[in-house]
Image (cartoon, helix red, strand yellow):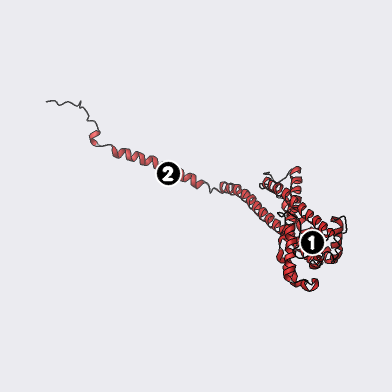
C-alpha cells in the first residue's frame, strides 16, 4: 500500500468500502431522524396538527412518542397507543414498518465492523479512493432524491409505499385508525429531507477528510523531492566543503596541543647527565 499506483483488487475493495459506508450512513441517518422527536414537536405547531386532528398537544405527543419508542432499535414488545384506538390492519402495517427499521438495524450492525476493517486496511494507502466515492454517493443520490421530492412529493410518497409494502394497509381510515390524523404527509416529507440532509453532511465530511489526506500526501512527496535536491546543490557549489575543512583543522589542532602538552611535562631533572653512571667518586 506504499505505492501511489494501486492494484486492481485494491480499487475494487475501495469501491466496495464506499458502498458499505454509504449504507452505514443511510441507516444511521434513518435512525437519527426516527429518534429526533423535536422535529415532530416543531411540526405540531408548524402544521397546526391540533387543529387538523382535533386532539390537544399532550394527547398528540404521548401517542406519537409511543409509536416512535415502538420502532426504536432496542425496543421490544407490541405497539399500544395510550389514548387512540387501532385496527388490526393498522397494527399489521405498523409491524411491517418496524420490520423495515429492523432491517436498517441489521444493515448497520453488518456495515460497522466491515467499514472499520476497510478503513483500517486503507489507512496507509497513499490514495484513499473510497472517500471521494462515498462522498459522491452521499451527495449526488440525496440531491437527486431531493429534486424528486421538490417536483412531486405525493408521487414519491405513494411510490415508496407501493415499493416496500405488498398490501394497501398503509391507506388508513381515520375512523378506525385516528393516529393517521396526527401524522400528516408533510411531516414525512420533513423526515425525508432530514435524512437526505444528514447524508449530504456525511458526504461533505468525507470530502474534507480526503482533501486533508491529499494535502498531507503532497507535502510529504514535495519534502522527499526537495531533500535530495538540496544535497546535490550543496555538493555542486562547494558549500559542503566547509564542514570537512573544519574537521581537518580541528584534528590538526588536536595533534599540536597533544605534542605541546607532552613537551611541557618533561622536566630538566629527568634528563640524563652525560658521563655519569649514577655513583659518587672521590
Q: Residue at x 70, y 66 (%)?
A: 38
Which secondary structure lies at badge 1?
helix
Residue 144: percent from the left, percent from the top?
A: 81, 61
Task: Quarter of the image for the N terminus: give it.
Answer: top right
Side of 75 relative to 278 (left or right): right
Q: Nearer the viewer, residue 234 or 143?
A: 143
Instruction: Decide if residue 209 is in sight here.
Output: yes
Furthest-left residue in this view: 282
Residue 26: percent from the left, percent from the top?
A: 75, 56
Q: Looking at the rendering, which quadrant does residue 197 occupy?
A: bottom right
Q: Nearer the viewer, mark 2 or mark 1?
A: 1
Say if 241 sits above or below 70 in the image.
above
Residue under circle 1?
A: 143
Q: Earlier in the sequence, mark 2 or mark 1?
A: 1
Q: Nearer the viewer, residue 4 or 109?
A: 109
Binning the other alpha carbons within 10 Å of mark 2 as few (below 14), some (14 to 19) or many (20 upward) gives: few
Say if 122 sits above or below 71 in the image.
above
Binning the other alpha carbons within 10 Å of mark 1 as few (below 14), some (14 to 19) or many (20 upward) gives: some
Residue 19: percent from the left, percent from the top?
A: 76, 51
Residue under circle 2?
A: 250
Instruction: Decide if residue 129 is in sight here.
Output: no
Which secondary structure lies at badge 2?
helix
Residue 195: percent from the left, percent from the top?
A: 75, 60
Amino acid at each position: 500500500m506504499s505505492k501511489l499506483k494501486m492494484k486492481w483488487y485494491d480499487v475494487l475493495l475501495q469501491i466496495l468500502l464506499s458502498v458499505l459506508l454509504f449504507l452505514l450512513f443511510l441507516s444511521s441517518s434513518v435512525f437519527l431522524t426516527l429518534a429526533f422527536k423535536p422535529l415532530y414537536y416543531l411540526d405540531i405547531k408548524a402544521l397546526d396538527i391540533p387543529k387538523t386532528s382535533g386532539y390537544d398537544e399532550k394527547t398528540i405527543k404521548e401517542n406519537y412518542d409511543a409509536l416512535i419508542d415502538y420502532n426504536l432499535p432496542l425496543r421490544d414488545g407490541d405497539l399500544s397507543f395510550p389514548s387512540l384506538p387501532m385496527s388490526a390492519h393498522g397494527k399489521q402495517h405498523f409491524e411491517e414498518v418496524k420490520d423495515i427499521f429492523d432491517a436498517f438495524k441489521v444493515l448497520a450492525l453488518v456495515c460497522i465492523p466491515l467499514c472499520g476493517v476497510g478503513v483500517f486496511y486503507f489507512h496507509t494507502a497513499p490514495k484513499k479512493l473510497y472517500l471521494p466515492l462515498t462522498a459522491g454517493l452521499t451527495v449526488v443520490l440525496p440531491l437527486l432524491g431531493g429534486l424528486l421530492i421538490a417536483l412531486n412529493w405525493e408521487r414519491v410518497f405513494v411510490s415508496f409505499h407501493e415499493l416496500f409494502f405488498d398490501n394497501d394497509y398503509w391507506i388508513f381510515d381515520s375512523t378506525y385508525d385516528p393516529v393517521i390524523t396526527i401524522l400528516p404527509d408533510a411531516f414525512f416529507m420533513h423526515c425525508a429531507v432530514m435524512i437526505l440532509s444528514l447524508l449530504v453532511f456525511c458526504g461533505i465530511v468525507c470530502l474534507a477528510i480526503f482533501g486533508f489526506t491529499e494535502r498531507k500526501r503532497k507535502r510529504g512527496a514535495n519534502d522527499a523531492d526537495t531533500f535530495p535536491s538540496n544535497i546535490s546543490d550543496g555538493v555542486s557549489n562547494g558549500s559542503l566543503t566547509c564542514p570537512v575543512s573544519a574537521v581537518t583543522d580541528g584534528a590538526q589542532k588536536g595533534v599540536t596541543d597533544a605534542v605541546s602538552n607532552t613537551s611541557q611535562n618533561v622536566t630538566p631533572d629527568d634528563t640524563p647527565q652525560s658521563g655519569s653512571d649514577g655513583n659518587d667518586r672521590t
